[in-house]
Amino acid sequence: MKNVKFIVAMLGLATLTPTFNSCKKENHCVETAIVKTVMLPSIEEANGDVMFKMGDKVVTKVKAGEKVTLNVMPKEGFRVESVKVNGKEVELPYEFVVGQEAPKVEVVIKKKLATIDLSKVMVENATVTFKMGDKLVTEAKEGEKVMLNVVAKEGFEVKSVKVDGKAVELPAEITLGTKVPMVEAVVEKMLATIDLSKLMIENTTVTFKKGDKVVTEAKEGEKVTLNVVAKEGFEVLSVKVDGKAVTLPAEITLGKVAPVLEADVKPAMLDLRGVTQPNVTINFKNGDFVVELARPGTSLVLEVLPNEGYTVESVTFDGKAVTVPYTFTLGAKLPVVEVVTKEKVVVKHTYGVVSLIGDAQPNHGWGKDKDYDLTKSKTEDYTWEAKGVRMTHHPNGSRSFKFRADHAWKAEWGGFTVTGTCEGVAHIKADGFGNAKVAEGSEGTYDITFNTQTLKYTFKKVGDL
């Protein structure tokens, strides 16, 4: 056959398919194109099957320029990682046009990655979150990195966290395995922080210590040592913590809230013995009792007693002239008491004897040899005494008497010059003649004392006539 060209060329896996010219007239032949047949490569993949399809038909060779689909079927548990044709990545449905040469196909099939359900990870009394970047996720693939955080709920605190048995610091980056990670956390009830700096008691300094260190705050359940020290001029009498009496310093265990402190704090006792003046005895009385220590605010009575041989001329109290006894309210400091005294001019009388004379005394008379003698005391100067003296009256009704010295009238003491106490005697009074007089109905037996310096007497009835 003339003008027919037949070309067969083997280029790799491709062959040339010749076509014949159609000649209508001699020397007028039309040459048809030669189409290349391309053999498709056989792809061996251990983890799946790879084949070429045109439509539903599996093909092993196609003509250049035809479109084929690469059908990749991974085995169970595996997945298609990537598909490249002639070095270029193609996406599902892995469709491409065959060129003049057999395509170079690369298929990567890998074990399928597990999807990890992170929503199942929980910790009691805490919220567990996972992030990829800034996004919260509830699931992620095996091998992916996620950021774990565990946030305690209100009133609790996270003490420690472990992931698959290994301690981690939060937030923790973890790489997911094939299973849900096991997250363990120690979450404890949060201990309250007690602000101890706000606990105050008027006129004191309140401190709390842990060991030797002063603290202003501590945790619920911790033990601290409380001390309450009075400021100058005050003293702490008692302390209560939450209504219970304690002895200072007191160890207390803190509760959920700050303890309630109560204290009985009073002005410090003043030592009244510090108030002195020469030549006198200064007493402070509360009722009938002399007190040495007293608290500010106490009502007291000032008493100033001159020492023997002195008289009190004047008394000033905190700069103010007063008459004693003086009633006042004790202030925060000891009062300033100033006393002006004067030494007495003492005339020491020396008598041989002191006697009773008059109708009322045992000898019943005023004349010579009628004296009833007293005995000088062995323990007290100028004092004369007698025991069991019958004090009665003269038949004429007179009950008068006097003391006199040395059986003479140079020194005598009667109703206008003497004072004293009478036990068992209604009274002794002046009779209008300068004498002392026994009251009617008071006759009896008496123990008697008389002091010639102070001019004081005592009559103590010891029996009836």
Image (spheres, rainbow, N blue to C red):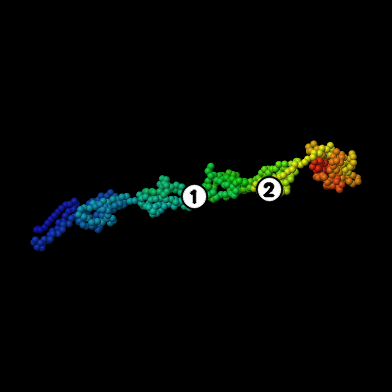
Foreground: 307 or 186? 307
Which label's residue is closer to the chain start, 1 or 2? 1
Identified at 63% across, 46% down, the residue is 268
Q: For the residue carrying disc 2, how many other residues have a C-alpha within 10 Å: few (<14), some (14-19), or many (20+)?
A: few
Q: Which residue is mark 2?
A: 319
The x, y position of residue 45, in whole percent, is 27, 50
Residue type highlighted by circle 2: Gly
Q: Quadrant of residue 465?
A: top right
Identified at 18% across, 51% down, the residue is 12
The x, y position of residue 83, in whole percent, is 27, 53
Describe the element under mark 2 as helix, strand or loop: loop
Residue 18 - label: none
The answer to whether residue 140 shows anywhere in this view is yes
Q: Residue furthest left?
A: 26
Q: Quadrant of the N terminus?
A: bottom left
Identified at 38% across, 50% down, the residue is 146
The x, y position of residue 134, in whole percent, is 39, 53
Residue type highlighted by circle 1: Met
Identified at 10% across, 61% down, the residue is 28
Q: Which residue is mark 1?
A: 190
The answer to whether residue 423 shows anywhere in this view is no
Describe the element under mark 1 as helix, strand or loop: loop
Foreground disc of the pair 1, 2: 2
